Structures are given as C-alpha cells and as structure tokens.
Image (cartoon, rainbow, N blue to C red):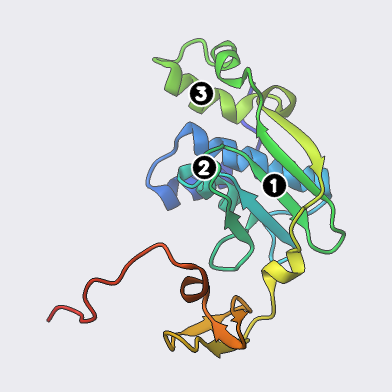
Amino acid sequence: MAIAPDLQPLLAGVAAMHKHLCPRQVLGLRMGLLAGELLGLELPQQNKRLHTFVETDGCFVDGVTVATGCSAGHRTLRVMDYGKVAASFVDTKTGRGVRIWPHLNCRTNAGKYAPQAANRWQAQLHAYQIMPAAELLSASSIELLIDLKALIAKPGVRVNCNACGEEILNQREVIQDGQTLCRACAHGGYLRIVDDGIPS
C-alpha cells in the first residue's frame, strides 16, 4: 500500500518544521485530513473558518497545524491540556464539529502494514502513513460546551488592568468590584514575581 499523494507534501512540511518525522506528527496530519473530509472543508485552510482544539502539546500539534492551517499564531488553535493525542475540529461557519483520536488498536495493527520495520517506532511511522483511516483513527460528532464566539472575541480590543497596569487583549479582562482586571490579578496567576528588574 502506497502513501497517498496528498500526504507527501504535508509529510515534507511537518518534517521541515520539526526537523524530523515521527509517528505522532503523522497522526496529527491524518487527523487534520480526516477532519477536512468529515466537515467538507478544503485544508490546509487559507482563512480562519476552522478552529481546532488539540488535547496535548508536542510534535502531534505540528502535524495538525500543517494539515489544517490552524495555529496559535492565527488564533485558530487552542491547547486543552488533557494529555491525549486527540483533537476537535469546529467549522465556525456551520457550527459542526468532530473529535478525532487514534483507534485503540492502531499501534498493534501497525506491524501488519510495516512487517519489515526495524522496530515498533519505525513500524508506526510507516504504517500511520498508509493505514486506512478507519483502522488508524476514531471520530465522533461533537457539540462545543464553550462559546466559540466569546473565545475568538473581537480582534483589536485592548484595555489595561487597574491593578498591574498591563494591557489585556481579546476581551480577556475580568470586571470585579467595578475594576477592570487581568485574569492573573483577579484569580491568581501561574507565577510569582521575585525580581522586578531585567538583569543587565
């Protein structure tokens, strides 16, 4: 079984982006391609119609990015840190969405598609490129429980936090006791400042 022609340039793209190619990158590519097929979208996108939620970070995300055109920089990709190689893809025009994850047996079935591979990693790398989508991936239709329009927000909206004075973008401010606050000042952040100066 040969690698699909539409996968070849994507494999080259993700390998160049990540400096090598690994099985999880291929999973990300295949998930992105399947999402486009299931949602009837031409990918990688040239606009911001598709929004993607990946459930872990790492090399898998590079595959999703190359296949879909979604990225954190374009505000069309969000990491939901569940530690799962899975992603949900939402068409912002229709509201339709799908969640895609590896088939439970894809690792064990990889050996059937790459019997000459030197090891399991190499078998997965090759097999994930050629396995039928039905054997490699699982998918289900989804309904988002978060407000996608609020998440995307209005670009260009800026306010300053009344506590720290820093600028807040994308309508992420919190109004608390009549004060406009950043989320860190309102709820506590992920860090504690220990020195206010930049070392010289």
Q: Position of residue 183 (x, y in %)?
A: 52, 72
Q: Residue at x 52, y 42 (%)?
A: 60
User: Rounded to the nearest whole Å, what is the CA distance between mark 1 and mark 2?
Assistant: 13 Å
Mark 1 vs mark 3, foreground winner is 1
Question: Mark 3: which secondary structure?
Answer: helix
In the drawing, does residue 194 fall left or right of residue 186? Answer: left
Residue type at mark 3? Gln
Task: Say few, some or many: other residues with alpha carbon within 10 Å of mark 1 (under 14 / 14 to 19 / 20 or more).
Answer: many
Secondary structure, mark 2, is helix
Q: Is residue 3 above or below residue 78?
A: above
Relative image position of residue 21 (x, y in whole percent): 44, 38
Q: Residue at x 40, y 15 (%)?
A: 119
Residue corresponding to mark 2? 60
Tag in front: 1 or 2: 1
Looking at the image, residue 62 sits to the left or right of residue 109; the answer is left
- The quadrant of the image that shows the C terminus is bottom left
Splitting the image into 4 quarters, where does residue 152 fall?
bottom right
The residue depicted at 71 percent of the width and 54 percent of the height is: 43
Contact (Cβ within 8 Å) of mark 1 with mark 3: no
Q: Is residue 93 visible?
A: yes
Q: Residues within 10 Å of mark 2 (few under 14, many from 20)?
A: many
Q: Which residue is mark 3?
A: 124
Front-lying residue, 71 or 198: 198
Mark 1: amino acid? Ser
- 82 relative to 151, above or below: above
Does residue 165 appear to the left or right of 179 in the view shown? left
Of the image marks 1 and 2, the number of the one nearer the N terminus: 2
- Vertical relation: 136 (above or below) 184: above
The mark found on residue 2 in the picture is none
- Residue 88: which numbered mark, if any? 1
Amino acid type at circle 2 is Phe
